[in-house]
Amino acid sequence: MKLAGIDAALPAYTKETIADLVNAAKTIGNAAEGKKVYEQAGCIACHIPGPQQSKIGPDLSNLARGLPVDMIVTETIWPALNVKEGYEAATVTLKDGTLISGFKQTETADAIAIRDMTSGTMTTIPRCATQSIKTGGSVMPDGLTAALSTQQLAHLLRYLFELGK
Ligand code: HEC
């Protein structure tokens, strides 16, 4: 089976593509193989399963309990479409030129709070100290799965579909 566009860069974001991928995962995917793909494709760098959490990506160990399979496919293939709350990328330039980047936590008329990606430290910056604030997008790059074959992608998704089940 060859799914349209999967072996190219990013596949088209359509209901059909998602349904094909869900179907491939359920029919030809194998979770144990998918765990290996998860490690090889670099997911592990930001999503470390178990108690020793990486602070970059959210904990995926109970992923399938909280997210339906079509959403798991969407989050994996097109991460920028749906940025999880508390994980929106933000870069603040202070008036003295210092750059602070991380995940936006809250933003009010007076201040913006940012969580550092590696240490998890929160910094609240008063607006009067900022020169510019840029927010938006996901820190999870697009195209991580672009180099995978249809079979490898089916394994990876099957693994994700079973996390926490
Ligand atoms: C550079 C770090 C990084 C890498 C590498 C990465 N992710 Fe992510 N991932 C994130 C961040 C940050 C988020 C939260 C923001 C968002 O929703 O896009 C996220 C969100 C997700 C979510 C949604 C979780 C939820 O609860 O909504 C899934 C599923 C996911 N990643 C799967 C993967 C898979 C599979 C791979 C490997 C192909 C991968 N990620 C690689 C950083 C990363």
Image: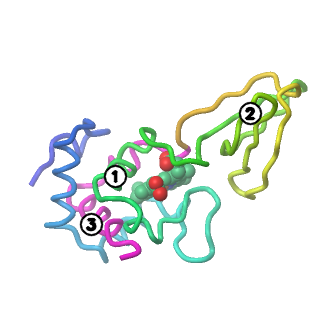
Residue annotated with mark 2: 108
Which kind of residue does numbered mark 2 sit on? Thr
In this image, 126 relative to 138: left or right? right
At x 35% / y 56%, what residue is drawn?
72
Mark 2 to mark 3: distance in Å?
Answer: 43 Å
- Magenta range: 139-165
Q: Quadrant of residue 9?
A: top left
Which label was assigned to residue 120? none
Q: Is mark 1 within 8 Å of ligand 1?
A: yes
Q: Nearer the viewer, mark 1 or mark 3?
A: 1
Vertical order, 6 against 90 (above or below): below
Residue 123 inside the magenta-drawn segment? no
Q: CB at mark 3 closer than 8 A to ligand 1?
A: no
Q: Quadrant of the N terminus?
A: bottom left
Magenta highlight on residue 163 = yes
Q: Are marks 1 and 3 in contact (CB under 8 Å)?
A: no
The residue under label 1 is which amino acid type? Answer: Met
Image quarter hosting the C terminus: bottom left
Q: Please tell me which residue is depicted at 81% across the width and 46% down the height of the picture.
A: 123
Q: From the viewer's perspective, is the residue at label 2 or at label 3 nearer? A: 2
Query: Which residue corresponds to mark 3?
Result: 155
In front here: 20 or 165? Answer: 165
How far apart in space, not on screen, are marks 1 and 2 (Cα)? 30 Å
28 versus 101 height, above or below: below
Residue 150 percent location from the top left of the image: 21, 55
Snapshot colouring:
rainbow
